[in-house]
Image (cartoon, helix red, strand yellow):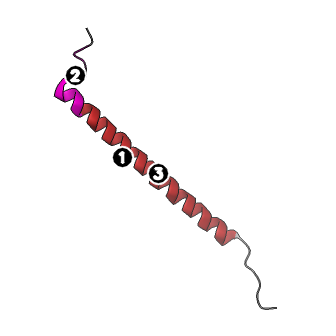
Amino acid sequence: MYGAIGSGAAGAAGTAALAATGAGFSVLASVVAVTTLIAAGLALYKLAPRRRTGN
């Protein structure tokens, strides 16, 4: 009864498109996470007190 659902070329194309979208979203999420961590690190570096070297 359910054998025809998702079978054939249309089902394979839909599955491939869904997998590609998921992979793209995963890469995008990784890029956003890395960018956020870099921005947070730079913000903390700017907030850290500077060493005094003139005494």
> How far apart, in angstroms, are the residues tagged by discs 3 and 1?
10 Å
Residue 30 badge: 3
Residue stretch rendered in magenta on the structure: 3-13
Query: Which residue sits furthest bottom?
Result: 54
Q: Are marks 3 and 2 in contact (CB under 8 Å)?
A: no
**Along the polypeptide, which appears first: circle 3 or circle 1?**
1
The kind of residue on which mark 3 rests is Ser
At label 3, counting other C-alpha atoms closer than 10 Å, the crowd grade (few under 14, some 14-19, many 20 or more) is few
> How far apart, in angstroms, are the residues tagged by discs 3 and 2?
32 Å
The kind of residue on which mark 1 rests is Gly
Quadrant housing the N terminus: top left
- Residue beneath the point at 41% across and 50% down: 27
Query: Which residue sits furthest left?
Result: 9
| In the displayed structure image, the side of residue 53 where residue 20 appears, left or right | left
- Residue identifier under label 2: 7
> How far apart, in angstroms, are the residues tagged by discs 1 and 2?
24 Å
In reply to whether residue 12 is colored magenta, the answer given is yes
Mark 2, secondary structure of its residue: loop
- Residue beneath the point at 31% across and 36% down: 18
Query: Which residue sits furthest right?
Result: 55
x and y, in percent, of residue 15 in the image: 28, 32
x and y, in percent, of residue 6 in the image: 25, 22
